[in-house]
Amino acid sequence: MSNLNDSVSFVLDDKVVTEDFRNSALRPTTTVLNYLRSLPLHKGVKEGCAEGDCGACTVVLGELQPDGTLRYESVDSCLLFLPMIHGRQLITVENLKNDRGELHPVQQAMVETNGSQCGYCTPGFIMSLFSLYKNKNHPSREEIDDSLTGNLCRCTGYKPIIEAAATSCVHHGMDQFSRNEPQIASLLKSIPRESLQLQTGQQLYLRPAKLSEALSLIRLHPEAFVICGATDVALRVTKKHEILKEIIDISGVEELKLISDKPDVLSIGAGVSLSDAMGSLENNFPALYEMLNVFGSQQIRNVATFGGNLGTASPIGDTLPVLIAYNAKVVLSNSAKRREVSLDEFVVGYRKTARRPDELITAVVLPKMRNGSIVKSYKVSKRKDLDISTVSGGFRIDLNDRQVVENIKLAYGGMAETTKRALNVEKFFVGKPWKREVVEEAMQIFDGEFSPISDARAGAEFRTIAARNLLLKFWSETIS
Ligand SMILES: Cc1cc2nc3c(=O)[nH]c(=O)nc-3n(C[C@H](O)[C@H](O)[C@H](O)COP(=O)(O)OP(=O)(O)OC[C@H]3O[C@@H](n4cnc5c(N)ncnc54)[C@H](O)[C@@H]3O)c2cc1C
Ligand code: FES
Ligand code: FES
């Protein structure tokens, strides 16, 4: 790789901090949470679950934008490896007081609404509120709830915290961070956006800055773990205590973070975070937008990517069924060429994909829909928010003007070892009127399509009934 750098630099406490991995106890997979807790003045950040579920470890990252301003996003520091914050500002609860020692408006509001009892969750809540403060003025109740989905509080209850959000996020995000922004921006600009190569005793961590470098690296290191948001892979480190020997972290490749919106197709780079993608999806791909609305939490969506969700090939990955319904394609590239694979054909077995060892997922391509097609997505889970699917569905139907089915796609998650379409049911519908009696008849042949497993989330029978009923729900939501 060109311009290799073997240290990681970021802004913390208004200074550029450089961590050299050669002579330190740090590993490239040291999480930002563990790094912060090793410092004397940043112990406010807490570990609750170490798997992205409780938000006690929430910090905010400031990222330089092309126009020279900063964007602030909440993230779970327990799932972020330290090199992933190279070139960014790391903001913790200790940074929120201003120069005069006064509390930040979100902290003051938490005091005034009695938003804390035992206090263990409080720094995480404060950081989520701070992110809300910087991004929304007079947030709606829905926006407040969404910003707090990733934070768990066992004793205060949410009412005073929601009140703190509503009363404090009213200053257009103005605070000492806004005033300091030019200085922080120039510090961030001073950090070269070079490729990183961190070699420690047991680990090689490669963080290319360019796509061409990433593609050469994957050819040279086909066994390496590719990571982008790391919200899936980090659990191997935090929960299973694995030492990942070779890692290619593509989160620094700007070419993978592009969205191209053309009249016929929307193309989303594999490294675009789910939060960033949502803005482009709301109008043209509402069923995918709805699915992302109930995907993890804001902290997860701010780093998780489409490339990563498809890369897991998880049978309960939430984007795959609805992407299949939209006839989407995944773009796979190696150093020599790129190819497009229909998402119907991308997953070839349990957690196995059609990606070759020298390829990366570089984008997802969504054809814009023709008039009359209807796509809907469904997620059945124990909780509405921050839960994984028990059963999910991505359905599409094209009806002619006599309400007869011309095309139908019924893609399910959670019903087999891969995302799977109900092909016999689809065949049954084609040429038939889209009527309740026909749907009820189809529900009878449904049982032969899948043999779902029983696990802690649900029994096989529940899954089959839920999947069948989703079909009826789809019908009820699509009749004119
Ligand atoms: C608290 C929590 C909540 C979650 N909620 C949901 C949810 O609601 N729905 C859901 O579906 N998932 C959920 N997940 C799982 C995970 O967040 C998603 O699968 C996410 O999209 C993964 O993206 P990532 O960029 O973080 O992937 P990473 O962890 O970086 O990578 C995941 C896999 O994809 C591969 N990969 C990543 N990028 C590429 C690429 N460009 N080319 C080739 N391979 C690649 C990696 O090698 C790895 O195998 C949740 C996870 C957590 C921790
Ligand atoms: S420690 Fe629970 S989300 Fe990070
Ligand atoms: S104040 Fe105790 S967990 Fe929230």
Image (spheres, rainbow, N blue to C red):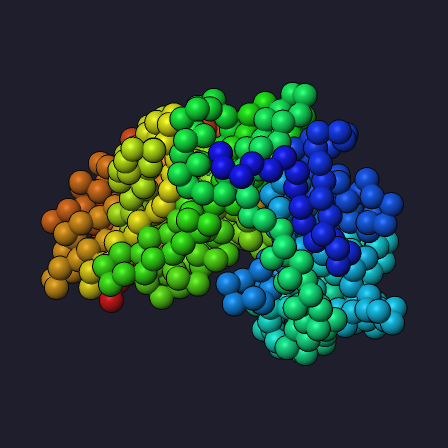
Q: Quadrant of the C terminus?
A: bottom left
Q: Position of residue 370 (x, y in %)?
A: 20, 60
In the foreground, 407 or 150: 150
Q: Answer with left or right where residue 337 lies relative to residue 289.
A: left
Q: Quadrant of residue 363?
A: top left
**Is 108 displayed left or right of 174 in the figure?**
right
> Which residue is more in the foreground, 5 or 171?
5
Which residue appears at 30% of the width and 52% of the height? 366
Whether residue 164 is visible, yes or no, is no
In this rendering, the answer to whether 214 lies above or below 112 is above
Q: Residue furthest front?
A: 3
Question: How many numbered marks appear?
Answer: 0
x and y percentages locating residue 474 in the rendered image: 33, 54
**Who's the residue at 88% across and 68% down the image?**
101
Please give the name of the residue rendered at 49% of the width and 51% of the height, measured from the top-left corner: 273
Residue 464 vertical placement versus 397 (above, below): above
Q: Position of residue 448 (x, y in %)?
A: 29, 31
Q: Is residue 175 left or right of residue 419?
A: right
- In the rendering, at what x and y percent does residue 345 appear? 28, 34
